[in-house]
Amino acid sequence: MVNVVLFDLGNVLVRFTPETFWRSLELSSLNQQIPFAAKVKTLSNQFERGEFSADDFFHRLGRIFDGKFSVPKLQKAFSSVLTKPIEGMESVLATIQTRARTALVSNTNEYHWDYCRKNIPAIHRLQASYLSFKICAMKPDPKFYAHVIEAEKLEADQMLFVDDVEENVAGAERAGMRVHLFKTVKLLTETLREYDLL
C-alpha cells in the first residue's frame, strides 16, 4: 500500500529548460558555453546543496563570467529555466490527496524555490517538501532518501517516488521505495491507478 507519493519538481510539476539560461545571456552556441559550462554546473550544484546564499551565488556566478553580466541580468537568466506548470499535474495532485499524502522531493535552490512558490499553484497542494538546499544533499545521494524516509516515519515501500531523471529513480529504488520514471501525465496516471490512488 502506498501512503505517500513523492514528486520531483523540474519537468514533473514545472517545465525546466536549462538551455534558456544560456540563451538569455546570448550564449546559445556550444562553443560560447564551453568556457563557462563546467564551472556554472559545479556552482549550481553547490547552491542546490545549500552551501551558500542566493546573494553569494550570484556574486560567484558573476565572477565566472568575469563581470560581463549584471546581477539582475544573471538573476533573470537563472529564473528563465523555469517556465510553465506541467499541464494536468495540479489536477492529479488534487485527486491523489483524497487517498494519500503528497510531498515534494527536489534538487533545487532557495532562489528557484521562491520563484516556484509564487508561480506554480500545484506547489501549494503538497503537504511537505524535501529540498536539497535544506537537506544539504542532492538526489541520488543516499542521504537524501534516508532523510525523507526518516521524516515521513514510514517504511520505504509505502512510498511512491516520481521523478523524470533515471539516476534519481534508481537511487529511490535502491532505498526501497516504489518508483515511477515520469515521462507523461498519462503514463503517471496509469501507475497511480495501479496503486488505487486515482
Image: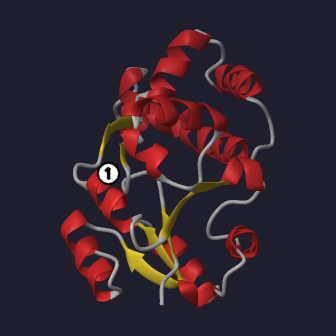
Which residue is drawn at the image coordinates 48% and 36% (left, top)?
116
Which residue is drawn at the image coordinates 76% and 44% (left, top)?
50
Residue 2 lies left or right of residue 105; in this view the side is left
Q: Classify residue 129 by image quadrant.
A: bottom right
* Mark count: 1
- Residue 21 seen anywhere in this rendered image of the structure: yes
**Above/below status of 28 relative to 198:** above
Residue extending furthest toward the front = 98
Residue 92 coordinates in the image, percent (x, y) = 30, 61
Residue 7 coordinates in the image, percent (x, y) = 47, 63
Return the residue at label 1. Answer: 90
Describe the element under mark 1 as helix, strand or loop: helix
Quadrant (top left, top right, bottom left, bottom right) of the C terminus: bottom left
Q: Classify residue 130 by image quadrant.
A: bottom right
Residue 169 coordinates in the image, percent (x, y) = 49, 76
* Mark 1 residue type: Glu
Q: Around disc 1, counting alpha carbons within 10 Å, would you say few (fewer than 14), some (14 to 19), or many (20 or more)? A: some
